[in-house]
Structure formats: structure tokens, C-alpha cells
Amino acid sequence: MNVVPGRGARIILAMLPFILIAIIYVIGSAERRAANPDDKLLPPVSEMVVTSKRLVAEPDRRSGDYVLWTDTAASLRRLALGLGISALAGLILGIAIGLLPVAGAGFGTLVAVLSMIPPMAVLPILFIVFGLGELSKVVLIIVGITPMLVRDISLEVAGMPREQLIKAQTLGASTWQVAIRVVLPQIMPRLIKCLRLMIGPAFLFLISAEAIAADAGLGYRIFLVRRYLSMDVILPYVAWITLLAYLLDLALSLIGRRAFPWAYEQEAR
């Protein structure tokens, strides 16, 4: 129970589930192809490698674009805008609601109610109001993530030791100074952790919006080729999205540990 694996053992244990999944997939793919040579559900790994190479390194015949990189750039641009605006709004509103009793009484319940609305339910409304362009896709991410960020940040601010705030006020700090110099530095690690948890939902909202109305993007490509049962495109795209989400999560984790090492001391122990 108390055995802590070393670095090498930890790497092996982390890779083991992926190796098992790969083995199961190869066996399943081989069996399905043996039973039906035209089976498209589980394409062989070699077939997916050839398709991925074409998407990555060969320009499209009609557009001349390198499809995977064009789709990735379009999706990451939308995702970055959505996450960036959500983080800024969540930080400002969360601090205001958690720090100021008037703001908490006036907007706390509203934010709680808004966080319960399924974002996908308002997607048609966003398309009607903002059109089918880039704005509606970014707004969907903002609508889906911001209320949750605001609630979490406001609860974190409200749970801060009141002695710190009282001492700062006793020393002559204004509300603005308390928010900037006392609350903000302590709340930033929490914001980064919240953003890490929101990466998955953000990708979900992004892909859903791209699937309905887009001319480029990871979600657009997946739903474009599904009518042809092109699993040799869909599966690599799903794996690529997963890798991007993991790398983004890792980047946020490294930023948090470098910028706010004191917030991760407990985890290190």
C-alpha cells in the first residue's frame, strides 16, 4: 500500500495501459479484417499511418492546404480565444463575487443558475444571434466554461482567511489593493487548476460547434468524413485531439509549478 514506484517503474506503469489497448486494437482489427476484408470499423494501424501521412505531409488536391495542420490551427485559435476570455472573465467576476458582499448577493445566485444551463442547449440560439462564423463557436466555449470558473474562483476567494483581508484593510489598503495584492496572487494557482479541468469541456463545445457549422477544424473534419465511415481519418483525429488536450494540460501544469511553486508544495510531499 505504501510502496512508491521509482521513476523508471512509474514510466512503465504509465505506458502499460496504452500498450494493452494497442494490442487489443491490433487483435480486434485483424480478426474483423479476416472475417470481412472490406470492414471499415477497425482499420489496420498501417492503413491509419498512411492516411495520417497524407493528411500531414501532402497538400489537399482542391484547396492546396495541409489538412491536419489547417484544421489544427483553426481549432486551436478558437480554443485559445474561448479559454482566454473565459479565464479573464472568471477571474474578475470570481474575485468580485467572492470578495464583495454586495456583488455576491447580487450576482452569486445568477451565476449559479447560469452554470446549470446545458451549453449545447443554447447553441442554436448562439448561431441565430452571432451567425455561423467564428464568433458563435468562441461564445459557446465562453458560455460553457465561464460560469463554472466564476463559481469556483468566488468560492475560493470566500474561503480565504478573513484575517488576511482585515490586516490589509487595517494597514490602509483599499478594496482594489486588497483584490490585487492579497487575493489575486493567492487565487492564480486555483485559476490554472480550474482551466486544466475545463480543457475537456472546452474541446467538447468546440468540436460540437465545428461539427454543425464550419469549413475547417478538427470537429469539422471528423463529422465530414463520418458519412463515408472513414475511420482511418476519424481515429487519428481523435488521438490527435487527445494529445493536444494532454499537452495543453501539461503546459498549464508546468506554468503553475514554475510561477507558483508554493501552491504545489503539498502535492510534492
Image (cartoon, helix red, strand yellow):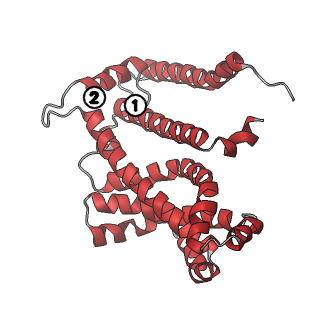
Left/right placement of residue 255 relative to residue 105 reads: left
Q: Mark 2 belongs to which amino acid?
A: Leu
Mark 2, residue position: 55
Vertical comparison of 76 with 12: above or below: below
Q: Position of residue 20 (x, y in %)?
A: 61, 22
Mark 1, residue position: 236
Vertical comparison of 64 with 204: above or below: above
Q: Position of residue 266 (x, y in %)?
A: 75, 42
Q: Secondary structure at mark 1?
A: helix
User: Residue drawn at (62%, 44%), measured in percent from left and top?
Assistant: 260
User: Residue drawn at (36%, 56%), measured in percent from left and top?
Assistant: 209
Q: Position of residue 92 (x, y in %)?
A: 51, 66
Identify which residue, 22 or 77, lies in the foreground.
77
User: Residue drawn at (68%, 43%), measured in percent from left and top?
Assistant: 262
Q: Secondary structure at mark 2?
A: helix
Question: Which quadrant does the N terminus fall into?
Answer: top right
